[in-house]
Each structure stands twice: as structure tokens, then as C-alpha cells.
Image (cartoon, rainbow, N blue to C red):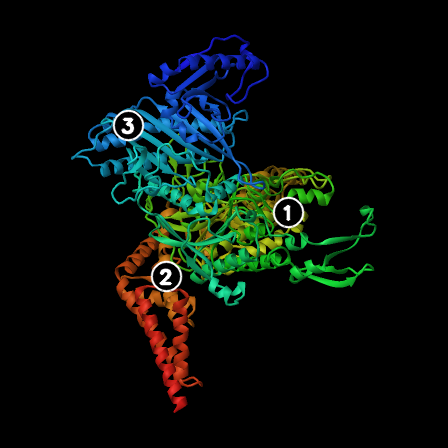
Amino acid sequence: VDLPVKKSFDEDTFSSESDGEFLTPGMNFLSTLKSAAASAVAAEASVLKTSGFSTVSFVRPAGKILPQRFGFLWSENDHVFELVEQKRRKGLWQVEPPIANLLDLQKLKGLASLYCPSRTRQWHLFVVTEKTGVRTAALRRVFVRGLVRKLDVKPALTGDKLSACSGAIESIKPHLTSALEELERAQFDDTSRARSADWAHVYLCVLPAYLPAAGKDLGHAEMAGALRAATSEIMLKCGSLIRRTAVSCLEMRLAAIDGTAWRVCVSLPSGFESDLEHIDIYREALDQSGQAVYAPQPAAGARPGPLAGHLLSRVYDPLETLQRKRLSARRLRTTYCYDFPSLFETVLREEWSKMNAGSQLPASTKLLEAEEFVLNEVALQNGESIWNVDLVPIVRPPGQNNVGMIAWIWTMKVPEKTEGRQVVVIANDASHSAGSFGPKEDAVFKAATELGLKRKLPIIYLSVNSGARFGLAEEVRNKFKVAWINESDPAKGFQYLYLDDADYEQIKTSVKAEAVVTEYGEKRWILTDIIGVEDGIGQECLSGSGAIATAFSKAYHEGFTLTFVTGRAIGIGAYLSRLGHRVVQRVDQPIILTGYAALNKLLGKEVYTSHMQLGGPKVMANNGVSHCLVEDDVSGALEIIKWLSYVPCTVGGPLPLITPKDPVDRDVTYYPEKEEKLDPRAAIAGKKKSEDSTEKMLGMFDDGEWSELQAGWAKTVVTGHARLGGIPVGVVAVEVDTVSMNIPADPGDASSSEKSVAQAGQVWFPDSALKTAQAIEEFDLEGLPLFILANWRGFSGGMRDLFDGVLQNGARIVEKLRTYKNPIYIYLPPKCELRGGAWAVVDTKINPERIEMYADETARGSVLEPEGIVEIKYRDRQLIKTINRLDPVVKALKREEGNTSINPAVKHGNESAIQARQQALLQPYRSVAVGFADMHDKAERMRAKGIIRKMVPWKNARRFFYWRLKRAVVEEALIKAIRTSRDSMSFKESKNMVANWYSESSSSASVSGMESPNTDWEQEMHELIKFVQWSESESKRIQSRIETLQAQSATRVLKQFMNSDGGPVNALLEAIKEISQNLQSSEGSISTAEGKALDVLKETRDRLQNLMLDEQTG
């Protein structure tokens, strides 16, 4: 029963968002109104109850936002209608009782909820604040409820009963989106109680009875399966909005035409769940006591959900510990460490969907398996040092860790390796001591890094930390006493700190102290040093920081490391980011050495205002620390997966090849306009013909596969990953336009100011030379072939540039190219040039086994530019000689001048005429000289002098370089196999062996055709294709030859052991031990055959040891 109350006071007096907030004006009227209402309800109580009413609500105007409500509930104990005070039913009277039942508001009974309206009144938001302890932050939970009064089901989804189930869920999507948008709007509204929600629950009650009735042709399990699959699809589509609004639970009630009702419950504890395991289906039913419960109705192959058998009216429980940990991480604007596997799997699923042209993988397909590792507790209990303990696998629920560092091995099914590739993942637990590094955290990090190196797996570090841990000995702080200089005046200072005798006996292992007896006979222990019983409150944390710093630095140089700064990285966390080199940074998270508040104290004034000012993306993206910037953790996971797709699955393993969507045999259609210089990014990845055009001019590499790195730093050089015909490569290119380098002002230095320094294109500056050297080093460690699209005029040589290290960084380029272990292709594209010192640091002779150089026919290269050469080598004197030799007028005047019979006056006139003519022709002939000098710079001369291998037209560069690269990939794999069996064989010898195999295979096979400088690019390309085809068709024969080499190598090694001084048995025993240890080192991933071999070796070792023992005892 709803009884409206007439307005009898000023409407503007009340503007409360909830019925729980009453202002002073009108209070007397409200009290009078309640008394009158109570009398009226009491008078009609028997009639109301007999008619079946148990609730009476009163509504009165109360301002511009909402009316105010109060009400009466029937008490079964006292058999009267009781006035419900706001404290007991706060917020719930804002919804009409019939609707309240449909919205399951009885589940909020007992919770101190505040009502928050929506704009349309379709959605009802209830805010609950939870606080479990004095030191814990209050958590804000928001419950969103709403009725769906109409379903617009697509006709295509009404054909059969299963389609009807899917259609019902699909038609709920617009309503779910509307609810989420309302929640998002409230969360960012400073005037809303639902702002900054930590946790949200969405409940939708669908009023139309649309679901079909179960029967012989459609069982309950089939209906559940259809509802489950359809729900999974809309969750994937709404995933981004769900994560933004912090929705952790979603429940939908759907009525069926047979009068039954179904409940679809989705659990989203991390917000990234996308598989079917987190979707449960129930039917409403009555238990034996007649109460409505969740009756489990699992789909085929599914297990009953966690709500099975629970009452429908059960009040919501407080948040569990695991969820609180999630929310504590979320408050740091990061993801809880144990939720990253779900996050990455969600991103993988989205990537697979894109790969499959929009079709989605079955939600039951598991794309990521995470195996957690912990320190070996048995070894620790046996007294092993924490720094020498290995990691062992463990199976436990999330959040059960007692160390703030988590280590896994993830197996991810990715497009380039569908059976799964493994990575070692290390993550800070932000909910454990704010992610700080203590000795145990350092030990886990170090052991996980060593595990990655041992198994040759990529190492991913998910960084969110507060630096090295520090603290005080609490057991001492709670007991120490102070000896004041003047007991009555503590301001004069203290003499010493001490413990009394009883306290000292309790904590004497935590301190160093000297015993004294006071003049009053009291025994005191004067504190000199505090050790503390707890490990991890001081210097030991700094020592651990050194241990993990060296471990991660080693991992970068010997393996693959990548750091994702998903939360703040402070102190050693910042150093780890740099030591691992490859950094993906969120735009809202800093990388700093010290907090801004500590710096302000050091400076003695308020200078810095935030961590972001010190180490945000404006700093770290512009100084070369961060390679990529991302908006959130999902974008970061996508960037990591994309980066991993370019590098081998194991260090030193084969490149991850994919089938390219962009055909190899096509032209490069991008070409710079007549007055335009080469756009490096367009040359690599192509670009649209115009802003309004959909037609694209294609670049040299695979379309859509370019990923630029460090775009904000050293902008005169462009670096990144790309693919050529599905083969991953590293690319270095050159910016041609003038760019600006911004140097921020330091608030800590009053004399500093922001500067913007212009840097010309096609020039190496100190920062861009360093960026080039660093990129070359990183690509080499990643095992990638390198393409350099060269277009440099030289190095900047000013005093400031030399002071800033342009010379040192240029030398680093030479060093990194000299030691590069993978193929390098240096190509001068059209209208590009390579001159002076820039040529010297990339010349083929730096690394003749690896570097190959090519040029388009329009490219140029020389010591100086033509104008510069003319200034030095074709000066006016030489120009006049050329004019005298070529100009007919001057030649005629010269002939007249040579006539001995000519009049002296005429002769003098001729000389003046010659000089005038020469001066008039100097400028045109200077242009001729420049053109003449330019002809020396062309690609044809480079080829004739052996400086470049071939002239390759830009139009055909893609198809030529693909086959050149493909041949190199095949050849590299064969050479590696040969050198594995013969360590003493050089790269060149191994390459010659492969060439001999190829030459022996067919009379038409020609190695010289692939290597000769006398063939053109097209002839060479055909020979390259033949070589690749030979490697594929003769793969079995090639493998047989390699196995023969391996057998010969094993025989040679065995002979050396048998002839050793220690005796053949000892030598053989040592050899078996070494081989078995090598197999055991990769035991986690060895094959069945290797496992059998390991068993045989162990058995042979044992027999040999027994034989030696028998000989010694005999």
C-alpha cells in the first residue's frame, strides 16, 4: 500500500539524495506526520493484514531530486504494523515495496546502505561502506539493481528453443550496458555516493517470461549450456566497461513461459574472467522447508556453482580476504598479482578472435596455464641459505602467499605457437607490505630469474612496489625506557636508552647492551645496538637489492627480460626496470628513486608535488627508460604479448614465424613525392594516400605488423619491431624532418627553465646515437635479424654535442654492430643518402660475416655532399678551366687572343670579354660541377667498387629482401646445428659446408648465383628461392647429414675421454655425469626420448660406480 502525502511545506527545504538525511526545517511536521500515519495504519491494521498486506509505505514531496518515504512493517511477534526507523531500513524505502521484492532488496537487510538514484529511475544504486579494522581502509560497495521490462529479441534468434535462450541473453546486452554506463557515470560524479566504488554487484530482473519450457526436445542441461555460452559472449563484448566500473558480480533473473525462473550468475573477482568456469546457472526452487533456494542446473560438463542450495533471500556476506586484497591493489590503480593470469588470458582470447576474422574461440578453451613456484621450504628448514634455495612448484588458492613476491611459469597459447609457449613471470604483491622488497622477496626474485635463465625462457617482471623494506624492531620499541638528563625537563635531552633486567632477559637476542647499576641499586641494560628479531627491517634488504640487481642484469645480457610497470616502481624497483632495459610503463604510474615528500624534506621546502612529476611518462618516455606507454593493464598485457610474438620461445631458439596476411610478392607502393623526402614510418608500414582516403600505400614490411619502440626519445631515429613475410625483424630508420627535444625544468633548481632544442633530420645526435646502439644491442639479444634503412648525412659535431657524448655513442654503434650475431641488412631507400662518419659506423667491413649493404638506384653515398666536394675539389680555378674547355664563346675569344697579328687594343678587349664571360658562367658551371660530383655518389659506383652487394629497386625491395632473409634464416638454423656438433668449426666454415651440400644436390644449384656481385637482384632472387626450396625438399637428407656429424663428434669426444690420464672408466663416468646433468637442467621440458636416455645414463653411471667400487675393494 502506498499512501501519498500532500505537500504542506517549502519544496526547496529538502534536497536529500537519500531518505537517511533530513535537514532541520520541517522536522516537527515530519514527526507529526509519522504520528498521524501510525494512528491511521493501526486503525486499519486488521483490514490490511486480512487483505494480505504486510507493508505500508508513505511518500511525501521532499525537494527536487527524490520524494521521501517512510513505512510500516507487519510484526509477526506483536501482530501490529511497526514504524521502521531509518537506521533499520535506511535507503530501502526509496523503492516501492513491490519493486523492492523484484530487485531482491531483502539481500541488503542488515547492511548500512545509502540510496543513490539514477537519472532515469530505471536503475537503483545502493552504497555500502565496509571497514574491518582501525588500520584498514574503508571499502565502498555498490549494488546496482534494475528491472528489464521489455526484450527486443532479433527474429533470427527465435527459430528454435536453444536460439531463444541465446536470443534472450543477447537482448539483455543493451540493458546491461545501460546499467554499467549509469554506474560509471556515478563513479566519476563528485556529488554521488557511488563515486570511486571499489566493488560493484549488478542485478537485472527480466520481467517478460521469454525462456522456453524444458521438455523432451530440450533438457535443462541444454538450456543451461545455451544460457552459459551466450552470457560468455556478452561478457567478452562488455569486458572493458565491466573492468572500468569494478563489477565483480553479475546476476540475471529470467522467467520462463512455464512459470519457472532461471538465475544466471557471473563471478568476476578480478574483472578479467572470460571463460565458462565463472558462469553458473541455477533455477529457482523450493527446498524441503518450503524456502526458495538456488537449485543448481549445470550445463553438460560443468560443476554446480557456489550458490547451490543457498536461500534466494540470503543477505550478502562481507567481502572475503582475497577480495579485500584485490581491492587494496586496485586502490593503487593496479591489478592484484594473482589476477594477472586471468587478465592475460582475456587479452589472448581477444587476440585470437581478431586472428580468426571475428569468430570467437570456445570459452572452454584454456589459453593460459599458470604454475606457481615458491622457495623450497624443506631446504630452508634444513638450514640452507635463502640465497641458495631453488624454487619448487606448488598448488594453492590465490592469496595464500606469505611472501610479497610471486613467481610462475605461464604456458600461453599464442598464434605463433598454438601448442603454447612458456614464460617466467615475476610479480610484486601490492597487498603485502605495499609490494616492498624484503630478503624473502629478493630471494624469490633471484631464484625465479635464475630459473628463467636455466630454462632459457623469457622473463616478465610485473612491477608494483615501494622499494626496499625498512622498519624498526617492534619488540624493542615496546619495552625500551629513557634516561633523561633532567627527569623534570625532557626538553634538555636524554642520556641513553635502556632496558630493565626483566625486559632484557626477554629480548636480549634483539639487542646489544651494557649492564650498569644506578646509584639507587637498579640494574639497567644500556642499549648500544639494536639487531631485531625480525628479518627485513634494514641493511639486509639493501643487500638483497644488490643480489636481484645483478641477477636481473645478467638475465638481460644472457636471456630476455621485459618489465611492465603496472604500479609505482620505487628505489630498487626503478633500478630493475632499467637493468632489464625493455620497459612498458603505464601512463599513470611513476618510476622513481625516492618519493617526492622525502625529496622535499631534503630540500627543506615544498618543491615537488607528486611522484608523476618526478618519474612519470613525461620524464621516462623522453629519456629512453620506457620503450612503450600504455593506458591500463589490459593495454600493457597486449603490448607484452605482441613483443613476445617477435622473439624466440626460448633463448637461442628458432624465430617465431607466422603465415603473413600481407603477400610477399607485391610491390612497395609508397614512394616519396617529387619534393618530398622519405617518410621512415611510411617506408616501413605504409600510409594512407590522404587523410580522407581509404586506399593505402604499402611499405616494405608486413602491413599491420609494425610496432615502434621509444617513440618519445631521440626522435631523429625510429626503432621498432616488424615482420617481413611473417619473419620477425628489428628495424632502425631515420627521421628526415626537424624535431624538437624538450628538456623539462627541474622545480628543485630555481635557475632551470624548460627548453626546446631543435634537432635536424638525417643527423645523429648524442641521444639518437645512443638510441641506435641500444636498439641494435636489444635486437641482437632477442635473436632478430636487423634492417637499417640508412639515411644519415653524418653526426652532429658541435662542442655541446661532443661534450654530451656523441663520439662515445657513435663508437657504441660500431661495437654493437661488430658483435651482432644475426643477419644485418643495410639498405639505402630512394632519395636517401649515407655520408661521412655515418657511413663509417655502419660499413660492411665492421662485421663482414653478418652485414650486407644494398641501395636503390636513386640513393647516394660519399664522404661529403656534392656541394661540399665542389667547394673543396672543384673550386673557381677548376671551374674556369672547364669553362675555357667547353664554352664556344670563350674558346673563340681564346683563339683570337692567340693570333699574333691582332691589335693590342682588341686583344685587351678580348681578355676583358673572356673574364666577363667566365664570371657570368661560374654559377651555371657550379651547378654542373655539383651534378658531376653527384654522379660519383650514385649506387652504380657503390656497386662497382664492391661497397654494396646489389642495387635493389625500392619497388621490388620487399620481395627481394624476403627471400634474402628467408635464405639466411634457413642457413642460420643449419649452421647452428653444425656448430653444435663441431665446436671448433667457424661460422664461415659451417656456411661453406652448407653451400657444398647445396651444390652437390643438383647441377643447376649455384651458390655463386646467390653471392656473386655480377648478377642482378632478380637473378639472385631466383637462386635464393631455389635454395629455400632445396632446404625444404631435402630436409630428411640434410637432417641425416647433421646426425652423422653429431655421431662423429660424440665418437671423437669419447675417444678423448678414453685416452685421458684419469683412466677410461673414470673419464666415461664423468662424461655420463655431465650429460645427465645437462639433461636434468632442462628436466621440466625434456621429451619422452630424452627422459628415457636420462634413465639409461643414470643406470650406466650406477653400474660404473659399482664396478669401480668392486675394483677398489678387490
**496 displayed left or right of 581:** right
Q: Earlier in the sequence, mark 1 or mark 2?
A: 1
Q: Circle 3 sits on which residue?
A: 255
Disc 2 on helix, strand or loop? helix
Q: Nearer the viewer, residue 17 or 793?
A: 17
Q: Quadrant of the N terminus?
A: top left
**307 displayed left or right of 519:** left
Q: Quadrant of the C terminus?
A: bottom left
> Crowding at label 2, few (<14), some or many (≥20) Cα neighbours within 10 Å?
few
- Asked whether residue 320 is in view, the answer is yes
Q: CA distance from mark 1 to mark 2?
A: 42 Å
Q: Circle 1 sits on which residue?
A: 594
Q: Quadrant of residue 254?
A: top left
Q: Tell me, for residue 1060, which label it has, or none.
A: none
Q: CA distance from mark 3 to mark 2?
A: 51 Å
Disc 2 marks a residue whose amino acid type is: Ser
Q: Earlier in the sequence, mark 3 or mark 2?
A: 3
* Residue extending farthest bottom: 1114
